[in-house]
Amino acid sequence: MPARTQTSLVVFAALAGLVGCAPTSGTITGVSGPQIGPVVPDIQYLSAEGKKGDFDRIRYGLALVVFSPPEGARCCSLDPKVVNLSDQVRNLPVTVAQVSLPNGKRPHGEGCLEGCNHRNERVVTLCDANSVAWNAYGRPTPGSVILIGPGNKVLMTGTLDHPGDILSEARRLGLDEQERTRGDRL
């Protein structure tokens, strides 16, 4: 096996191991990096088990971030439209994240962590009880979908009600990335 291929496999395995241990749901605790512009900040969060998470560390190079108002006071209930987005990019290197914007009193307190512990491995679910990410991302309209690329650059925006264009672009870029990484392994 060529040295370059071995190095790529070792790096991939290390990243897979790191992501496998990181929580994929929780309550947003802060952001870091530029705010409100063509580059979005990283999101930090705390899982129901008390583990710290960092969105940039668990996501692929491409991510679809959806700002979604949950039904009622349940902060981390999954929106079926977000699950559908995830299903559409399931086999591609595209992370789908739902940032829930709760309204009203939450039954489990500010974080509503108990509701975030649903173990859906395909969708990252983050509760933005204090509107930290929502403010940092420029207060997008509920139902907004943001396609984020490498370097946290905003590549495209769309809506959850009409995701066709942004979903097509995420698929195209995901396929390009898949081909690029496949070429690196040869």
Image: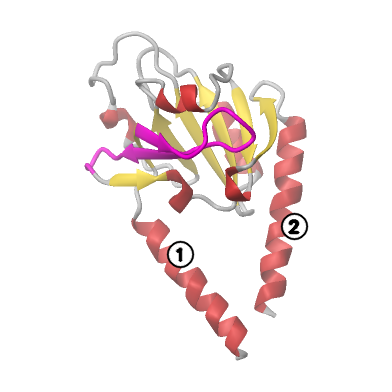
User: Mark 1: which secondary structure?
Assistant: helix
Closest to the observer, 186 or 123: 186
Q: Can residue 77 be seen from the camera position used here?
A: no
Amino acid bearing label 2? Asp
Amino acid bearing label 1? Leu
Residue displayed at 59% across by 20% down: 143
Residue displayed at 63% across by 42% down: 153
Whole-number angstrom distance, CA of label 1 to CA of label 2: 20 Å
Residue displayed at 25% across by 38% down: 48
Extreme residue toward the bottom, this view: 1
Extreme residue toward the front, this view: 34
Q: Can residue 162 be seen from the camera position used here?
A: yes
Q: Which residues are magenta?
A: 29-50
The residue to which callout 2 is attached is 176
In the rendered structure, does residue 91 fall within the stretch colored magenta? Answer: no
In the image, is 175 to the left or to the right of 34? Answer: right
Where 2 sits versus 87, above or below?
Answer: below
In the rendered structure, does residue 39 fall within the stretch colored magenta? Answer: yes
